[in-house]
Image (cartoon, rainbow, N blue to C red):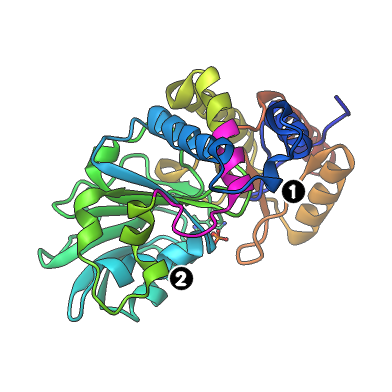
Amino acid sequence: MPERIFNFSPGPSILPYPVLQQAARDIVNFNDKGIGLIELSHRSKEFMAVADETESLIRQNLHVPDNYKVLFLQGGASSQFYMIPMNLLGNGKKATYLNTGTWSNKAIKEARLFGEIDVAYSSENSKFNRVPENNGYSVSPDSEYLYFVSNNTIYGTQYQSFPEKDSVLISDMSSDICSRPVDISKFGLIFAGAQKNMGPAGVTVVIIREDLLNNTPDNVPTMLRYSTHADKGSMFNTPPCFAIYCVGQVMKWLKENGGVEEISKINEDKASLLYNAIDSTDFYKGHAELQSRSRMNVSFNLPTPEHEAQFIAEATSVGLDGLKGHRSIGGCRASIYNAFPKEGVEKLVQFMEEFAKANG
Ligand code: PMP
């Protein structure tokens, strides 16, 4: 194996190395069939088997109940910002959103094109450094659904437990899907762009309860109706074949490594190493409030922007890559998704200690 750097990128992000190796072989010659994976017809028996296996592994890893469909869609997670209200909000209907950062803000903007949107909670005034507690807001009974972002990739906040409200729960889990156990039966719909914990960019996984497939208003275009894709097993048109294949490989890797339950413990361990390093000196300051801290994206600041620029440059030079924070909040961010190895976190922690000593 060539020497690999530690990739802290927020997404697209690190993938398990064995998955990359297998994909490289299969692109050229899939299952020794003398044809490359991305040359296969999406309707060939070989590719249908790939798609079926990917779906089955997602179902196993996330314990998806039988009354839910798993869909492979395109247009990025951002397309769900309008597909959800288009399909679930008819004229004059209402939905509730919790605003915990950039991605919920964008979803709210899109949803307002289709119905009345109640923003029941916002942490915008504190630079999105927290998520709400269950009793921190209320949901109106005539709301069709309650929408929230389970992990805020940019700000490094994450719901430690999910909202318990008498409403259809919808969650954008793009940056923490498969990182911890989730009781899918509590949700109406969850979705995730694959490019963090599931695979490469190009496919968005939507898990939707079947009874929600039938409420779409008549004027919604065919391609934007969930039922179109559910009825045809995500094969209504050409799906993103390569991305689906990769998600299958990542799901296989996850299953072989003990599934979501095991990876969740490792994620907890990696995140606490990093938060301990932040908390053990005044030199670093975490962005998120303690009870809202994300185990996937750790956002932090140094005393000055100059320190941060120097920190990122020196870290990059020793193979700790992708630590620059999002342009909207600056500072640093370490994204430590499922495939990110603990050794990389240990190396970062050591680097942080040395940097603080030399510059603090
Ligand atoms: N939701 C969350 C939580 C994200 O982190 C991102 C992208 N990083 C998106 C949505 C948007 O995803 P996409 O670029 O696939 O539209």
Residue at left 40%, top 48%? 233
Total count of labels: 2
Question: Which stretch appears magenta?
Answer: 233-249
Nearest to N terminus: mark 1 or mark 2: 2
**Which of the two discs, 1 and 2, sits closer to the camera?**
2
Q: Quadrant of residue 296?
A: top right
Q: Is residue 212 left or right of residue 346?
A: left
Q: Secondary structure at mark 2?
A: helix
Q: Is residue 110 left or right of residue 153?
A: left
Does label 2 point to a residue whose CB lies under 8 Å from ligand 1?
Answer: yes
Residue at left 18%, top 60%? 138
Q: Secondary structure at mark 1?
A: loop
- Whether residue 332 is situated above or below residue 35 in the rendered picture: below
- Give the CA separation, mark 1 to mark 2: 24 Å
Evaluate whether residue 197 shows in this view.
no
Three-letter residue code for mark 1? Gly
Q: Which residue is mark 2?
A: 106
Q: Quadrant of the N terminus?
A: top right
Q: Between residues 64 and 128, which one lies in front from this camera angle?
A: 64
Q: Could you say where residue 276 lies in the image, as x and y percent from the top left?
A: 58, 31
Query: For residue 98, which numbered disc appears in the image?
Result: none
- Whether residue 340 is situated above or below residue 141 in the rendered picture: above
Q: Could you say where residue 117 lies in the image, as x and y percent from the top left?
A: 27, 74
Q: Which residue is mark 1?
A: 322
Q: Between residues 57 and 316, which one lies in front from this camera angle?
A: 57
Q: Quadrant of the C terminus?
A: top right
Q: Is residue 3 left or right of residue 55?
A: right
Three-letter residue code for mark 2? Lys
